[in-house]
Image: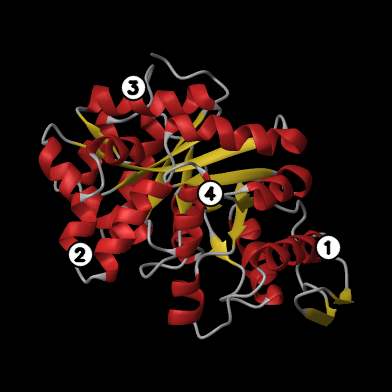
Amino acid sequence: MTAPAEVRWGITLPVAKLPLAAHGALLQEARDLGYSDAWTSETNGADAFAPLAFAAALTPHLRLGTAIAGVYARGPALLAMSAAALCEAAPGRFVLGIGASSPAIVEGWNATRFERPLARVRDTLRFLRRALAGERVDEAFETFAVRGFRLENPPESPPPIYLAALREGMLRLAGGEADGVILGLLSAEDVARVVAIFDEAGRGKDVVARIAVCPTSDARKAREAARRMLATYLQVPVYSRFHDWLGRGEILQAVRKAAAAGDREGARRVLPDALVDALYVHGTPDECREKLERFVAAGVRTVVVQLYAYGGDPREALRALAPRGQ
């Protein structure tokens, strides 16, 4: 099936097991294969901005986005400065994706309090709108105050700002005030429910989904890798509440019970194959592509492939998963 013209296909940077300095040829090939975007994330690897600055210097074609840059680890002004620099490096093709991240990353790793995430993201979004437009900002927002800040070099064209969102509050904020929404750790079937809420105020705006993919015919090995990842993520409070909301409370209760008893392997085992397969795309390249198309059919407009637990050459995987018609 050929992807509709309006659907964008992206890759996640940096690509696992490939040093950043070796990404030049891959980025050019990705564009040649029909990928239109490159997006970063922030956990405990690369930060969200440095790989995009590197990519901007290597290719003048790909749209570049952060998915996401957390609003707690950087101060509001520093976040605006980083975004302005990317706008200068990649004029007209940078998307600033922001989000709350999680308590483990914010408090456990970055020594900052994870408080009132919806309000903090809303305040940051409103500050960034003004700062990136070149305004002088001197205001006490609900969750922070900025006194007398103005960007020295505001971008000629401010970037679109997308929000990472899970449940109703953030989805409605994204639909009402942001330029797009970024989704993750959900199934194609979940997308329709989530997008319906976003569309109440954001119809016609971009819907980005970062999707973990492993093109392999070894289903057992793929599921083992997925279970290690999912059993951890599904215990993170923000994702746990999200999947409770999606109706998976009984499954998560079993995961929590095993984890509380110190039985990590048991926490993985209780995840049924059907859930693992819904949240983690694996199979032959054709099967993976067909599963990705289900996300498109459910309302995703930008599909971002995140290679996960793939043991081969990442360039071969991206070739195999390239958009049809290329």
Which of marks 1 and 2 precedes in the sequence? Answer: 1
Which of marks 2 and 4 precedes in the sequence? Answer: 4
Circle 2 sits in a helix, a strand or a loop, which is it?
Answer: helix
Q: CA distance from mark 2 to mark 1?
A: 46 Å
- Closest to the camera, between mark 2 and mark 3, is 2
Q: CA distance from mark 4 to mark 2?
A: 37 Å
Which of marks 1 and 4 precedes in the sequence? Answer: 4
Tell which residue pokes out farthest to the bottom in this image: 111
- Closest to the camera, between mark 4 and mark 1, is 1
Q: CA distance from mark 2 to mark 3?
A: 32 Å
Circle 1 sits in a helix, a strand or a loop, which is it?
Answer: helix
Residue beneath label 1, please? 130
Q: Are marks 2 and 3 in contact (CB under 8 Å)?
A: no
Viewer-closest of 25 and 252: 252
Who's the residue at 67% across and 38% down the image? 198
Which of marks 3 and 1 precedes in the sequence? Answer: 1
Who's the residue at 21% across and 54% down the image? 268
Q: Amino acid at mark 2?
A: Arg
Q: CA distance from mark 1 to mark 3?
A: 41 Å
